[in-house]
Image: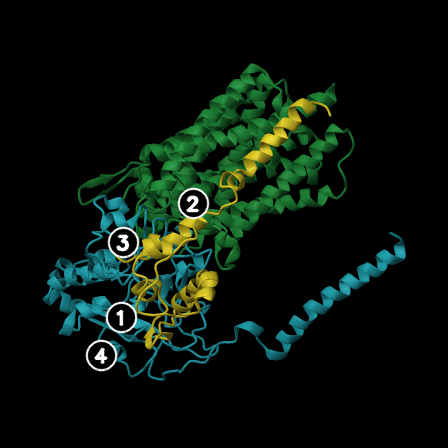
Chain colours: A yellow, B green, C cyan
Amino acid sequence: MYDGGKIIPGLIIFVLLVTFPIWYNKGNAGPVPQPELPKQYDKCVLPAEDMLAEHMQLLNQWRDTVLRTGDRSFDVTIGEKKYQKSLMNTCMQCHTSKKKFCDTCHAYASVTPYCWDCHLAPVE
Amino acid sequence: MFEKALKGNKYYWMWLAFLGTFMAIAAICYLRQFNYGLGLTGMSRDVSWGLYISQFTFLVGVAAGGVMLVLPYYIHDYKAFGRITILGEFLAIAALLMCLTFIVVDLGQPMRMLNVIFHAQPRSMLFYDMIVLNGYLFLNILCGWVILTAERKEVPPPRWIYFFVYLSIPFAVSIHTVTAMLYCGLPGRHFWLSAIVAPRFLASAFAAGPALIVVVALILKRVANFDAGKKAIDKLATIILYAALVNVFFVGLEFFVAYYSNIPGHKHTLDYLFFGVNHHGHVYDNLVPFMRAFLALFAVGVALLSIPYTRRKSDFWLGAGCLAIFISFWLDKGIGFVLGGFVPNPLNEIVEYYPTANEIFIVLGIWAMGFFILTVLYKIAISVEHEIEA
Amino acid sequence: MDKKRRDFLKIAGATTLAGLGGSVVVERLVTGEAPATARAAHEVDPAVGHGHARAEAGHEPVPHGGGHGHEIRKTGKRLGMVIDLRQFQKHPELIEKVVHACHAEHNVPSFPNKKDEVKWIWPTEYAKAFTEHSDYYRNSVILENEVLVLCNHCDEPPCVKACPTRATFKNKDGIVAMDYHRCIGCRFCMAACPYGSRSFNWRDPRAGLDMNHINRRFPTRMRGVVEKCNFCAERVGLGKQPKCVEACGTSKAMVFGDLNDPDSEIRKVLKDNFTLQRKPSAGTHPSVFYIV
């Protein structure tokens, strides 16, 4: 191989650098996030698994329904109460700590949703 | 062919480094603006478009000006333009990239710019602007590259490229017409609500674009041993002269309509731009020097382009005349037209616009980026010319 | 490729195009109008002359002219407002109260630098609010008092036409609404608005708010988006009155309601009083009227 003396070591260094996160933590993905769940209710708008997987899509649907179609009805049932489709006025009424709930998973997954630039998180 | 841009004498690299410095400063200034918001510029609630959009408007014209080389050569078989159509096409590429960059730095939420495609609105002129700008950019890249490659290989260009060349001609007219339509369809801005905006834009484009090409061609004769040919340059000077006269004629018509009809809505902005306005004892006239300069430079440019000695016998004065026309129309379209539309505001109040240093450095940096791209592309084109001459 | 195959492909392609295009042409000829834009029927109020309130069915020509490219509104509601300047002349302290109520409810920031200003509703002089009406030898009451101006929620909004992403749109109740999630901050709507109603967030609005004293039930906005009065869509959607109207109390200085409902209070006020609109020649058909 032409310049093989430079290419092979270079390739090895590259592969090591790129797989750094895997071998540095010895295959451990770090502590699983433990978001603090609210005490009043034991279920949310959807089952926990579905919320975990789909809360982003759900929030987007709510946004379009409320803002574009103008549907501000109280049609979200949690427990016995009815709520509007709202992040601030529904979700955050129970999940009152952004730090202990939302941020635990978001920080772990390295996701920074920009919802909080506008929507107000409860005072902590 | 990009490898041709990697070989150059020390002046070439010094020029690129000089431009690169401005680009780097602009990048830092843009980061500051991205973090803080557009409040770092001088734009306000009343003058909501400033230097960025005004540069974009002017540069769309410069990009469209390239058609003034393509049209005579490809449609009317004007052989003298044979060596320089590539200059027009590459200028269009550089100018369009500048335009797109100016738009992006002007956006409040640039991360969402693809929304224009995801949620396309055919009733909005910005939608069509996006289409024609990107379309014309693609056409110029395609045509310029394919034809230059064919020249380098010393074979005639492939037949299919001529479809795109012919398509690029109406596209050139359309980019500037659509940009004019951004302005002339808005019911609330009397200064812009005129049918002559599109013709005025085109006339100014067909003067400013070729003017820049002549200046650059004259510089290239000195530094890069590239001679565009006396016939071509002279013909371009003719085109520039006529287009410049037509543009100022159109501006004169705007004056007539405003001042003869005496309608305040039409007069108000021209008063502010050319004479200054007195509102409740406060005089607003910060753009008057620029507009007077537009007229003065236009007169100088036309004189230099008409007098046979300065036009034919002296490269320096010809270049100076073209530069005067270029700067004059930059003042007319960039400073006067766009900024003037916001004065007075819809409540007949006057709020003046002063760009901030951060904003000016970003503007300079994007111009530097444009000249950087232009230099690299022209280096490639000229190197190919020299290669086939050898 | 041999000639016979090329000919076959040419004929096949041409037939396909003819087939696709032909079906659209036939449909248009048969139904007599473009398929997707059949107008929703509205109640026509025979008492309404041409002019302010717009109830229209089919292709009735309206005498004062102008294109009718307006949206199909599904519920037929068209919210509007009448501002009674005489009440504000009698109670000038109401102006400050109204502005404060709106801006406090919606967390509108205030900045020291005028160029960063964000305002949804504000007072201005008569000549500036009504630029197309003469203030030549105008009487002193008009000249000395201020007029509240806000977004007119036009029936033919130029800002909605201009927006390249439909971040601003006309909702089903006739409110010109803003979707801050989609706005790219190009500010074309600000250039298009004939009334100067729109503000841009040149910087983070939270820097202009006292974060301990904001309305926590309504979001702030982020920097880089355009905002304006939204006719309190979030309140109106729940059957309440807009905050500015509520702040006027019992003075009836502002009346809000459905312009398409011939029995509504606002229609009665419009029938009984002479009203002005801002810049009628722009053809935008505003929903805000002023009793002078």
Vertical placement of residue C203 versus A123, above or below: above
- Identify the mark at residue C272; answer none if there is no mark: 4
Res. A18 image quadrant: top right
Which residue is tagged 2?
A: B253
Would you say C59 lies left or right of B386 here? left
Identity, as a three-letter code, of the amino acid under mark 4: Asp
Q: Residue furthest top?
A: B10
Q: Is residue B340 left or right of residue B167?
A: left
In front: label 1 or label 3: 1
Q: Nearer the viewer, mark 4 or mark 2?
A: 4
Q: CA distance from mark 3 to mark 4?
A: 29 Å
Query: Is the residue under label 4 in contact with that under label 3 (CB below 8 Å)?
Result: no
Q: Which residue is mark 1?
A: C81
| Front disc: 3 or 2 | 3
Neighbours of disc 1 within 10 Å: few (<14), some (14-19), many (20+) = many
Q: Nearer the viewer, mark 2 or mark 1?
A: 1
Q: Residues within 10 Å of mark 4 (few under 14, many from 20)?
A: few
What x and y, as percent, mark residue B159? 77, 42
On residue B347, the disc is 3
